[in-house]
Amino acid sequence: MTQLRRQLHQTSPSSDSNSQDHWFLVFDTDRCLLHVEHVWENVEARRGGALYQGSVRLELGEFLKQSGNDPVKRELERVLTGVFEEQLSA
């Protein structure tokens, strides 16, 4: 299975939070599916440095209907607009 991935956005750990999030636009070339993948990890210092991580894949429409994730949605919109840029300038 071939997947083309483009990072849309990431957050970095800060002094307030040990969590890190990454969002990707993913095209599965075998199944011809396009989706957004959210990958996260969080280190819980209070629990001896336990690492919690996971991921979720969302179809584009489902992702865009969710509230929040504004920087990710703006970047996704920019990427998708770029695909149709030629039509927009005509």
Image (cartoon, rainbow, N blue to C red):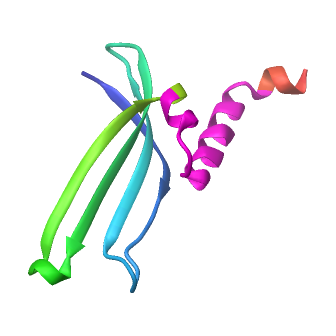
Q: Residue furthest right?
A: 90
Q: Position of residue 31 (x, y in %)?
A: 34, 13
Q: Would you place residue 5 above or below residue 32 in this image?
A: below
Point 32% across, 50% down: residue? 39
Q: Position of residue 22 (x, y in %)?
A: 40, 54
Magenta residues: mostly which secondary structure? helix
* Magenta span includes 65: yes
Q: Residue furthest left?
A: 48
Q: Would you place residue 63 above or below residue 9 in this image?
A: above
Is 63 situated left or right of 15 in this image? right
Quadrant in which the N terminus is drawn: top left
Q: Would you place residue 17 above or below residue 56 in this image?
A: below
Q: Position of residue 48 (x, y in %)?
A: 8, 81
What is the magenta range? 62-85
Q: Residue furthest top?
A: 31
Of residues 43 and 8, the one drawn nearer to the viewer in this rendering: 43
Quadrant in which the C terminus is drawn: top right
